[in-house]
Image: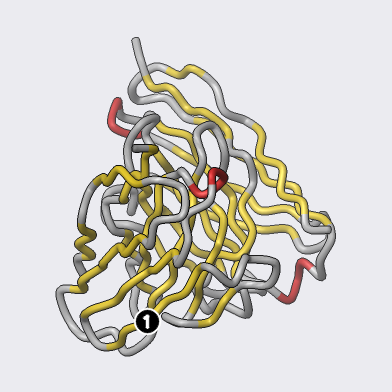
Amino acid sequence: DIQMTQSPSSLSASVGDRVTITCRASQSIGTFLNWYQQKPGKAPKLLIYAALSLESGVPSRFSGSGSGTDFTLTISSLQPEDFATYYCQQSYSSPLTFGGGTMVEIK
Amino acid sequence: EVHLVESGGAVVQPGGSLRLSCAASGFTFPDYGMQWVRQVPGKGLEWVSLISWDGGSTYYADSVKGRFTVSRDNSKNSVYLQMNSLRAEDTALYYCVKDRGGSSSILDYWGQGTLVIVSS
């Protein structure tokens, strides 16, 4: 199975900050990497697919990059509604696997 | 608008069985693979199962293989998860999830989940 490791596991940031979350795969997965946002009590929501493609309706302050084993989710200017937990997920091979999550909290 | 509505979650004793259902609307259901993902409250996400658009291919996490069975009825726009020999570690919120395209495993729409509690 492909292991997905996210860092940090949590971070505190202020509105307007630039936030970067990283995700590392235990083997090369090309660009088969997706990012999700989950708010408390809600289902996850797709943000980025295929490493860098923005899902329809997702604000352009979200962006993804990377390929192979190392990936990044960036929020260019954190907004109040962005405080949530973010997960990466590989869609390269079965079983699908997720990172452990990064909780973005208000500083 | 895509809607996925899960049902069937309950409190069940260890060793028991449960059948989860997911009713889909707002898209051409027979065209898409469907998945189940679970989450222990307060913890991370764990993939459970995938069924292809026609039900011809199914995949399972090792943790549920041999105990869970996924199926679908395209005439009813529904997908199911039959859960047997339930264990305490199966306690979780179970999400029904739509694939972005075919069985790409890009999870573009999620239901709100149905809670399964395995406890004596």
Task: Residue at 31% x, 29% y: name it.
Answer: B87
Is A89 located above or below residue B77 in the figure?
below
Q: Nearer the viewer, residue A32 or B5?
A: A32
Task: Residue at 57% x, 38% y: name it.
Answer: A42
Is A4 located above or below residue B85 in the figure?
below
Is B20 located above or below residue A3 in the figure?
above
Say what amino acid the circle numbered 1 marks.
Answer: Ser
Figure colour scheme? secondary structure
What chain does badge 1 belong to?
A
Task: Residue at 32% x, 73% y: name it.
Answer: A72
Q: Quadrant of residue B98?
A: bottom right
Horizontal and vertical percent position of residue B53? 65, 73
Relative to B96, is A27 on the left or the right?
Answer: left
Image quarter hosting the N terminus of chain B: bottom right
Relative to A2, is B41 on the left or the right?
Answer: right
Horizontal and vertical percent position of residue B75? 83, 61
Can residue B12 be seen in this snapshot? yes
Q: Which residue is mark 1?
A: A65
Q: How many marks?
A: 1
Q: Nearer the viewer, residue B11 or B96?
A: B96
- Dot 1 lies on which element? strand
Q: Residue furthest top?
A: B120
Image quarter hosting the C terminus of chain B: top left
Could you classify mark 1 by the number of other residues whose Cα lies within 10 Å: few (under 14), some (14-19), or many (20 or more)?
some
Can residue B69 be seen in this snapshot? no
